[in-house]
Amino acid sequence: MSHHNHEHDSEHEEKSCACGCSQHEEQAHIHGHDECGCGHDSHDHSGCGCGHDHGGSEEGERKKGILRLAISAVLLGIGLTLRLAFRLEWYFQLPVFLAAYIVIGYDVVIGAAKGLLRGHIFGESFLMSLSSIGAFCIGEYPEAVAVMLLYQLGELLEDFAVDRSRDSITDLMDIRPDSATVLRDGEWAVEHPDRVPVGSRILVKPGERVPLDGVILEGQSLLDTSALTGESVPRTVRAGETVLSGCINTSGALTVETTKDYDESTASKILELVENAQGRKAQSERFISRFAKYYTPIVVGLAVLVAVIPSLITGNWVEWLRRSFVFLVVSCPCALVISIPLTFFGGLGAASRHGILIKGSNYLEALNRVSTVVFDKTGTLTQGAFKVQSVLCVDGVTEREVLTAAATAEQYSVHPIAKSILACVDEKELPACDVYEEISGHGVRAEIGGETVLVGNEKLMLSFGVLFDPSEGDGTKVYVYRGDAYLGCIRIADALKPDSVQTVSELKKRGVRTVLLTGDGEHGARTVREALPLDEVYTDLLPQDKVEKVESLLPGAKGKVAFVGDGINDAPVLARADIGVAMGALGSDAAIEAADVVLMTDEPKKLLEAFDLAKATHAIVIQNIVFALAVKVLFMVLGVLGFADMWVAVIGDVGVMLLAVLNAMRVLKK
């Protein structure tokens, strides 16, 4: 949607990984890519020790990597024995250390060569190859092997951590069934859901996931909707109600008539949304990409200066070459490259688990900067359903008499107001109407037991010459007349959702400005205005008026402006706000298309959860950036001063990477 004010510019930009590889897809270390920082191509390698999946069997590649680590470690041990215990000459040691190096590092060296041929000069594999081969050149054979051994070990451990994060998210979103039991020529047949056309009858047995969106024809059951909404309590469904794909049928069998194709069903839409979400990079991720583009050449240049300038002054080339290689090893920014995208990826997965679908990490980060929340009223802060609020009776008449008379006349109506009145009585006890007539725009006239009953608005009462007392209260007024007497007035209003007050109050505590936009008149909005601590309320607004009002709020806002609406009638303003949040939009195509964030339940408090998750994700990103850069700088200084050798450098580099990855994974527990 071109009319968003979001940072979409990065969606199709070429992304430069700190490893030196260029991608047009998502972060390579999380999703895999053709040109990995280790230098391997997805179609022409045989066992990458880095642990990335390059198109072969991931488990098989991992086993090969572990075997290579073991063989190289044994050879390193033998070489150290020859060097330290027997003190053999270098030409006896070199073959053993060289064999250990080739076993564990041949793929990285080949990857560096391929990177050079492709123009990716300053890749991660280049830094590791340069520093380890340099160590060989100055006679530091054990350190050369150790650099590559510990690097490959770190990559393998990092791969385990990333896979765990990815599998965790995959498990959460494993909601799309592979089969459907469909009625064909009078018999039930099992087919893939994408072969089931709209209007087909399918059978959903207990324990099965609903394969396609549809309407229940027969049966009653409890549906587990946790995968879609995050709600732990199953929902009761029966004939005539809608069911959505991805829910689990926990009890009775259901016969369902499908209403959407496989690709258009809720489960497919959600999966598509989550899979595409990571393609929209947050500002922090773009910073890391730009940072890496300049960082790696700079540190290589500094390493050259460390090797050359002191050596020219002191004449000790071997020592300063060693320090420059230590500097190179420490400088690898893989901790940032891996942990920052992983943090956002985990945040998106954690949100999905709780029924909050965020269309990209840029929106997840933007939620952390929201200063103004604009609410729609009906269906967002209110339940979107009429409910009897009060009954005003004339002297000598009870509330029950007024409600019973009104319900008796309204029992054949399908109007929402009639349903709200009928919900207050037992329909089984109502007598039948002898005559029933709906008067458009006025109300209902009925004949019951020889008496005329009128139920409707002021126009109805005036048209029949009924003397009544007009009510000045809020909401919709329904006047009731029976026989030859006016009985009273029923006031009906759209009730607030149970957590609306809590949500708005908490936003106020956090310093967030709250605004209400509604198409209702001043009287219709008075109840909401009095019940909620809103900063501003604007009434009598058409959809285009809401867009104009949000546009007027954007320039003066200290941060981002979020609009929360029902996702159907509010599509234009959802698209115009900095962040469009669709409330209670489960199964609504309009909401998923127009909004940036979709709250899959009718609970306003989910907005608070989204803000909390965005804050936690941002905090972890900042922690990783500060921690990684601080440790890197410290170790680089120690290396240049001669206080850190290559062993310490590699252990420090791998340790920082693993700690950053583990810290990033904490967001999955939020």
Image (tube, rainbow, N blue to C red):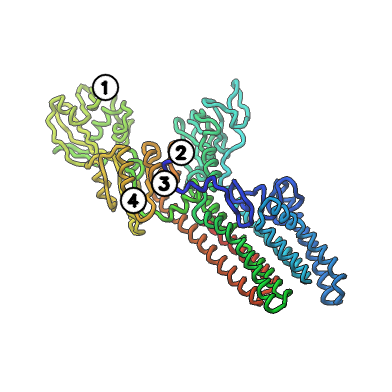
Amino acid type at circle 3 is: Asn
Label 3 environment density (alpha carbons within 10 Å; few <14, some 14–19, many ≥20) = some
> Alpha carbon of mark 2 to alpha carbon of mark 1: how far?
44 Å
Find numbered disc 4 in the image and state the secondary structure of the residue it sits on: loop
As measured in the structure, the alpha-carbon distance from the residue carrying label 4 to the one carrying label 1 is 56 Å
Tell me the kind of residue under disc 2.
Glu
* First along the sequence among labels 4 and 3: 3
Residue extending furthest front? 312
- The residue under the point 29% across, 31% down is 418
- Looking at the image, which residue is at 61% across and 23% down? 187
Element under disc 3: loop
How far is mark 1 from mark 3, CA to CA?
54 Å
- Label 4 or label 1, whichever comes before in sequence order: 1
- Counting residues from the start of the chain, the first of labels 3 and 2 encountered is 3
Question: Which residue is denoted by mark 4 in the rendering?
Answer: 555
Which label sits on residue 436? 1
Of 362 and 639, nearer the camera is 639
Callout 1 touching callout 3 (CB < 8 Å): no
Q: Disc 3 designates what residue?
A: 5
**Whole-Å distance between the Cαs marked 2 and 4?**
25 Å
- Please tell me whether mark 4 or mark 1 is closer to you in this view: 4
The extreme bottom residue here reads: 314
Residue 356 place in picture, x, y as percent: 47, 47
The residue type indicated by label 4 comes to Pro
- Left or right position of 83 against 30: right
Identify the residue position indicated by label 2 in the image: 593
